Amino acid sequence: MAEIKKLERIASQVRRDIIRQVYLSQSGHPGGSLGCTDLLVALYFKIMKHDPAFNMDGAGEDVFFLSNGHISPVWYSVLAHAGYFPPSELKTFRELNSRLQGHPTTHEDLPGIRVASGSLGQGISVAAGLALAKKMNGDDRNVFVLTGDGEQQEGQIWEAALFGPHNKLDNLIVIIDRNGQQIDGPTTEVLEVDDLGKKWEAFGWTVEHMDGNNMTEVIETLQRVVKQEKNGKPVCIVMKTEMGKGVDFMEGTHHWHGKAPNEEQAKNALGQLEETLGDFPAEGI
C-alpha cells in the first residue's frame, strides 16, 4: 500500500507538470497525457528495468516507445523525474530549439527518446522491430509500446498486429489507451474501433484488460504480464482511461485533446493536483 501511495504521489506531480508545460507554451495535448500518467509512472518507477545513463540500442534493458507521440508532456515529465534530464528543462517545452518538442524527436539527443513519434500508426512496427532484434540477440528484456485507440484506425497498426504473432514476439507488450476520444470527437462517432480485445485476440495476441487510472490494477496487470510464461504470443493490454484524468473540467471530453488552458483554467487545474516533488521553476504559474 505504501508503494502504491508513493507512485500515486509521483503521478500527481507529473499531472501538475503536464498542466504547467502546456500552459506555459500555450500549445500541446493535456487530455491524453493526464489519462496515461499512471501507466507511465508505473512503468518507469516500478516495472521496467532501465538506465537513465541511456544507451540508444536498449541492450539488456526494457524499452518503451510512445506511438501516440502527441502526449509527450507526460513522457517528458516521467523521464525527467526518473533521472534522464533535469526537471527544470520541462519549462522549455515546445520552445524553439528546445529538446522537448511537441512530438518526441531524436535529433535533439534527448535521453530516453529512441525514435521520433507522433505520425500515428508507426509505433508498434518500431517496437516489433526491436522486439525481434532482442530475440535474435538473446536479450530477454521486454519492449513496451503505448498507442491510442483512435490510432487503431490506421492500417499499419494491423500489419504490425500480424507481424508480432508470426514472429513469436512474446517479449512485445502493446498497451492501447482506450479513452474513447480523439481529436475530432468520440471514437464511436469518428470511426468505431470496438471490440478491440476481440480484434487483437483474433490476430493471435494474448489480451488483457485493465483500468489505467487505478494504480494498483495497473501494477498488478503489468507484473502479471511480464512474469507470465513465454508462449510465443505477444501481449495486448486494452487500458481503459479517462481523458483529462485528475482535472474535473478536462475529464471525458475530446475538447482537451489538443488545447492549452488559459491562466484561470491552469490555476484551477493545479488547485486539484497536489505538488509532491516540487514544481519546475517558471514565472507566473
Image (cartoon, rainbow, N blue to C red):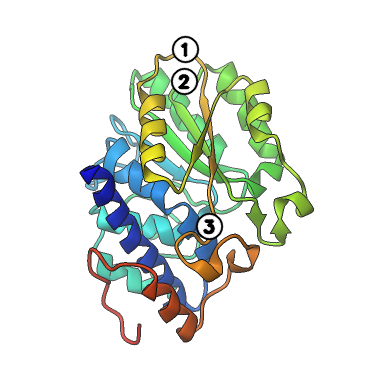
Which mark lies nearer to you, 3 or 2? 3
Q: Amino acid at mark 2?
A: Asp
Q: Mark 3 and mark 2: span between their CA atoms?
A: 27 Å
User: Against 27, is 106 above or below?
Assistant: above
Location of the C terminus by quadrant is bottom left
SS at circle 3:
helix
Residue depicted at 37% across the width and 59% down the height: 76
Determine which of the numbered discs, if any, sits on residue 253 in the image. Answer: none
Residue found at x 42% / y 45%: 214
Three-letter residue code for mark 3: Gly
* Quarter holding residue 226: top left
Q: Is residue 159 or residue 29 the one in the foreground? A: 29
Q: Nearer the viewer, residue 272 or 227?
A: 272
- For label 3, the crowd category at 10 Å Cα-Cα, with few meaning under 14, some 14 to 19 and many 20 or more, is many
State the residue lying farthest toward the front: 1
Instruction: Please rate how many residues cluster around mark 1, counting C-alpha atoms within 10 Å: few if below 14, some from 14 to 19, many from 20.
Output: few
Mark drawn on residue 170: 2
CA gap between label 1 and label 2 equals 7 Å
Q: Is residue 212 left or right of residue 7?
A: right
- Residue at which label 3 appears: 32
Sequence-first tag of 1 and 2: 2
Under circle 1, the secondary element is: loop
Q: Which residue is mark 1?
A: 231
